Image (spheres, rainbow, N blue to C red):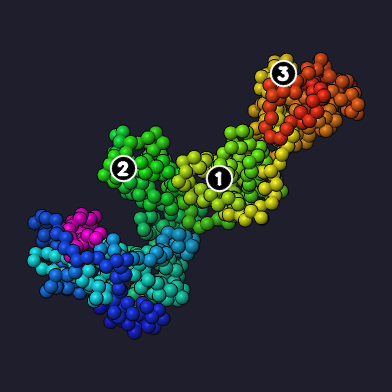
Amino acid sequence: MYNSLRSCLTAWKSIDAPDYVLDWIKQGVPLVFSQEPQPAHFPNRKLSFKESNFVDTEISKLLKNGSIRRCHIKPYVVSPISCVPKKGPPGDDLRLIIDLRYLNEHILCPSFAQEGIDTVSELIGCADLMVTADFEKGFHHVPVNINYQKYLGFYHKGVFYVFQVLCFGLKCSPFYFNKVLRPVVQFLRNNGLRIVLYVDDCLLMSSSSSVTDHCDFMLQTFADLGWRVNIKKSSLQPESQKKYLGFIINSEGPRGQPWISVPNDRIKSLRKDIVRILQYSSVKVRKLARVAGQCVSMTKAILPAKLLLRNIYRTIATRSDWNSEVILDNGTRIDLNWWIAALESWNGQCMVPKQVTLQLVTDASSTGYGGVIDNMEAAGFWNTRLSFKHSNYRELMAVLLCLKAFAPYIKNQVVQVLSDNITTVAYISHLGGPSAELSQLARAVWAEAIDLNVELRAKHLAGVENVHADYLSRLESPYEWRLHPNVFKFMDRLWGPHTCDRFASLMTTQLPVYNSLFYDPLTSGVDALAQQDWAKHNNFVNAPFHLISKILNVIQNQGAEATIVAPWWPAQPWFADLKRMSVAVPVRLRNSTRVMTRMGARPEPWKNKKWKVMVWRVSGKIK
């Protein structure tokens, strides 16, 4: 295996492999150090009789295929070896490992992009047939430059050995392995193959008419280039469902769409671990981290998974060290119980991304929020508490309120949220983040989306382009005020019970049923003057004074009854109608904070201290 790629150098040249890949195949890959390690010899832990015999057998195999060689002098760095259990058939239950932690501390390894399930989603088609291929000891195909083999030494029964190839546990092995395989993947894709390679796990997708030819071409290419395929671990029978990277990929899922899900054995294993943890008030950090890792690995197939991990990670972050214990708080327990109870019902996701059907543009200021979908507008004002919140919180809250406001129109849609706040985009896209407060709000956003069966996406929109929503968020209305709740209760006892607050908003409404100027989360209707149900309600009206004439017309035309806040303005053309329709003595209001509560700008009645503001009881049934 040591020379398997080198012996096929001509074939590598024929696929136009880059020069640096050809150099690595001919001379071996180098180890790049941040600082050269000092000579070191770490002793092996004591092996049992069974383990010792297993190591003997493994060393013989590695010598035979050229992965290691004996050394007559002590290597520069001698790392410890040991055995760990592995899943597999009887008689093959151990794995030989070399502990390279000391060496890895000194190695520089560039970051690189690794393909995975996201790439599968891009390439898979409906009704595709698939095969999987696994390389035999994949890293061992790539040679290490002879000048660096001295750093990969180990010792067993009086003999020193060094690896001549990339070994498992070496920090830079995945990087070099990925780079050597990239021209192979490129060559296969250029020849029409839809292939995904994650480390040494390969998935081929193709139509039923060409899958056999493509599989044969792929295997022949691997053989020509010196790669050995592990036939036992591969699944070369074309099928519409395959297990890949710990998931079940089904090209003929619900509604004929490609589908990804978590195998039942992984779900059972996770449940077992969580139940064991929940028996105690505190738990070892490593055990909780292991459960969190299992959960994270399932996020591609389980939509709300990330939302229900934030509390767990915050608990892990409270550790003093990795050997300590942490207390399971209530939030962590709730999330862990969700994983037990709801995991199966949420297991499975469509792999083909849907097209965006609606765009929701949102913005927030220190005074309010705004949102736009097509030609529909949502807007509102903050109360005192929200106005002093951080801008990131207000921006994310704006998204939540706009989703609620437009709920009837976005149900079952794919909605793209456009925000000029990067944090908002990040918390929606990643289903939370470092901040507990913002994560809780992001959780509420996604809960609303899930309830509406909305597929939610987020994208950043430059501030200069966010004109409409920005305008709505900065409205300063003198009409955003209401009667003090105690005053309203008095009016309700006097002429109530009232059933609809006609000119209100989420922040100013006195009643569960209300009409608003813009769409907002709980409004029963936009534009009170356009509603045709006035006669069905006992109406409470606290409207801009310039609308009183129109309001009286609506009340009279529909034969409704209402309690109206209106000034004593005898010179106005509507005043005679107001007095004629009045059925009780009006109640005068004082212009004070004990009577009127401001939500935004200075309330309209406060513009002139001489104005007399009254509460009138009127009826449209009086002719």
Crowd band around label 3 with a 10 angstrom C-alpha radius: few (<14), some (14–19), many (20+): many
Look at the image and tell me in which quarter the C terminus lies: top right
Q: Amino acid at mark 3?
A: Met
Q: Which mark is residue 491?
A: 3
Residue numbers of the magenta segment: 77-102
Residue plotted at (24% across, 76% down): 147
Label 1 amino acid?
A: Asn
Does the magenta portion include 573? no
Nearer the viewer's eye, disc 1 or disc 3? 1
Q: Residue at x 41, y 41 (%)?
A: 311
Question: Is residue 290 positioned above or below 105 on the image?
Answer: above
* Crowding at mark 1 (Cα within 10 Å: few <14, some 14-19, many 20+): some
Seen from the viewer's position, the closer of residues 524 and 428 is 428
Q: Which residue is mark 2?
A: 320
Q: SS for tag 3?
A: helix
Point out the image quarter for the N terminus: bottom left
> In the image, is residue 86 part of the stretch drawn in magenta?
yes
How many numbered markers are drawn?
A: 3
490 sits to left or right of 135: right
* Residue at screen point 31% across, 42% down: 320
Q: What residue would you read off at disc 1?
A: 392
Quadrant in the picture for residue 199: bottom left
Q: Earlier in the sequence, mark 2 or mark 1?
A: 2
